[in-house]
């Protein structure tokens, strides 16, 4: 059985397993100085200090109860807090000396560390693979004009796909208008439940400054850039190193280039070996996600979720095939068939960086892209090409604006196009970062930043979905650039 088939089966089984062993939304684990107790099926929970009621939560507010207790920063207050649990029968119980309140974990959640190890191993490979491949690729190009030509094509193509993606998102949000149908009760519940999470992201103080962004591409310390996983800085350093290695016409340069070529080959081989455990890792990641987040939150944000997923589907299965037909002679079916493994890993890990080693392996061995182009285009795309994230930010901004009653005009929507495109460039290729960059987009059109609390509940699931077009777009760019240079080989049908 092919590895991609095993991964797809693991995805399905993981979703089923996570559903069966899902976390009970009506149970809470409360750890006190006397041990652990589990409460369930409560009618209301009151946080008390002495006889004063600090906060009251109803039966459907499990996340809110946990978040409120964790949000109390005053250590003395936290030690003096007690809770009163009132049951439907009218009976109540008091719990004090509380140390921790959390969900009651299931076997599906306990298996997650195996998936986390898989993600860490792929992420471990990404930096040495990018560095070594780019140095070898840039050294093989030798001609600075050739590098500039490929770089210009790559950035131009990424800009084109990003603008189209954001436009698709805005059109979907304008037609469906998901924010207009949210009941005020649901709005208030979401804002209250995820208020602390939203505030934490807002306090990070993200901003968008083009000059600062361009300056930050040049690393002060390339080793620190590698340690931090800053791909733009790694790309800059590797390209310069490769270019000037090619200018040294001595044996010394060949030794260095051969060394990095060996590192690159070793990393690719390591990717292939790690992929043997991919089905098991994907099973644990998906089952843990489904078990923890479930599908209940989707009911509250169903229209918003449908709008985002519809936009991503149009992006992936309409825009990309059209661009593939327009710029290459590659068969669309064969292209997507070769991408199955990449799609499965991207969906389960929610990380373009973790998927990068797999994408490079597939592009070179299945899509016929030469290493010197793949090693340049893919690492760059992992950082600056985030079509799925850009589309999501456009839909999210429109959704939040609609919930708050803002009617964004054409000028404001064009501002979203520009800001979302720029924010996508500055988005790190790690899970959840798109939500932080969304704050920049909201600021640009005057929509309340606190509105991100409305969508945090489904962000993890949508993050998995939007990572897929992010990585497919990188492979697409690879094929398009290689084809334009007349260097594209045959696509493997296997």
Image: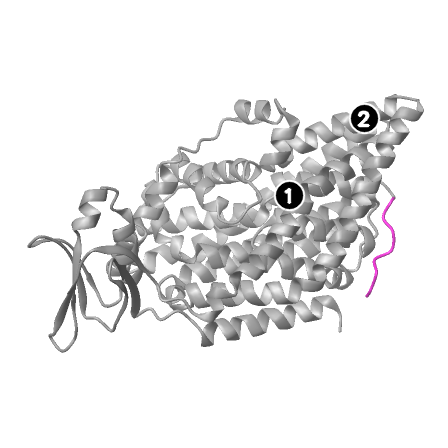
Q: Is residue 470 something one can see in this rendering?
A: no
Q: Residue at x 70, y 70 (%)?
A: 5
What is the secondary structure assignment of the residue under circle 2? helix
Q: Position of residue 99 (x, y in %)?
A: 27, 54
Is residue 493 one of those drawn in magenta? yes
Circle on res. 5? none
Q: Residue at x 33, y 68 (%)?
A: 25
Asked whether disc 1 touches disc 2, contact meaning CB atoms under 8 Å apart, the reply is: no
Considering the image in quadrants, where does the C terminus appear? bottom right
Is residue 128 one of those drawn in magenta? no
Q: Position of residue 97 (x, y in %)?
A: 20, 56
Q: Position of residue 299 (x, y in %)?
A: 38, 67
Residues in magenta, as a range? 487-494
Q: Residue at x 75, y 52 (%)?
A: 270
Q: Is residue 340 left or right of residue 33?
A: right
What is the secondary structure assignment of the residue under circle 1? helix
Gap between marks 1 and 2, in whole Å?
21 Å
Q: Position of residue 475 (x, y in %)?
A: 72, 50
Circle on res. 243? 2
């Amino acid at each position: 059985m092919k590895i991609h088939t095993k991964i797809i089966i693991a995805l399905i089984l993981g979703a089923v397993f996570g559903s069966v062993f899902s976390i009970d939304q009506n149970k809470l684990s409360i750890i006190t100085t006397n041990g652990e107790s589990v409460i369930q099926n409560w009618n209301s929970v009151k946080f008390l200090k002495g006889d004063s009621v600090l906060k009251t939560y109803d039966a459907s507010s499990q996340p809110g109860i946990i978040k409120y207790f964790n949000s109390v920063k005053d250590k003395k207050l936290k030690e003096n807090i007690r809770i009163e649990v009132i049951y439907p029968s009218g009976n109540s119980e008091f719990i004090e000396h509380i140390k921790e309140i959390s969900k009651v974990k299931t076997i599906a959640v306990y298996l997650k560390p195996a998936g986390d190890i898989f993600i860490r191993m792929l992420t471990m490979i990404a930096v040495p693979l990018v560095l070594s491949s780019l140095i070898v690729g840039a050294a093989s190009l030798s001609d600075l004009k050739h590098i500039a030509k490929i770089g210009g094509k790559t950035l131009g193509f990424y800009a084109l796909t990003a603008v189209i993606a954001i436009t698709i998102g805005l059109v979907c949000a304008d037609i469906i208008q998901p924010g207009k149908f949210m009941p005020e009760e649901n709005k208030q519940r979401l804002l209250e439940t995820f208020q602390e999470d939203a505030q934490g992201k807002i306090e990070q103080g993200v901003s968008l400054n083009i000059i600062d962004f361009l300056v930050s591409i040049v690393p002060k310390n390339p080793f620190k850039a590698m340690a931090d996983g800053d791909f733009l800085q790694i790309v800059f350093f590797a390209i310069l190193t490769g270019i000037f290695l090619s200018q040294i016409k001595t044996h010394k340069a060949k030794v260095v280039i051969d060394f990095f070529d060996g590192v690159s080959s070793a990393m690719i081989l390591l990717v292939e070996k790690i992929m043997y455990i991919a089905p098991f890792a994907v099973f644990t990641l998906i089952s843990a996600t489904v078990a923890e987040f479930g599908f209940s939150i989707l009911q509250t944000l169903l229209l918003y979720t449908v709008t985002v997923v519809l936009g991503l589907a149009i992006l992936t299965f309409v825009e990309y095939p059209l661009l593939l037909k327009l710029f290459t002679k590659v068969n669309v079916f064969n292209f997507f068939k070769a991408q199955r493994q990449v799609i499965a890993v991207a969906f389960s890990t929610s990380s373009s960086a973790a998927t990068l080693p797999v994408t490079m392996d597939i592009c070179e061995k299945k899509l016929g892209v030469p290493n010197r182009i793949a090693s340049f285009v893919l690492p760059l795309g992992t950082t600056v090409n985030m079509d799925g994230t850009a589309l999501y930010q456009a839909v999210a901004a429109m959704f939040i604006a609609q919930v708050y009653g803002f009617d964004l005009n054409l000028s404001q929507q064009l501002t979203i196009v520009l800001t979302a495109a720029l924010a996508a460039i500055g988005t790190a290729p790690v899970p959840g970062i798109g939500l932080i960059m969304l704050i920049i987009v909201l600021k640009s059109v005057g929509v309340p930043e606190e509105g991100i609390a409305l969508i945090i509940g489904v962000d993890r699931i949508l993050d998995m979905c939007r990572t897929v077009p992010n990585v497919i777009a990188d492979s697409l760019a690879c094929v398009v650039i290689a084809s334009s240079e007349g260097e594209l080989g045959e696509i493997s049908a296997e």
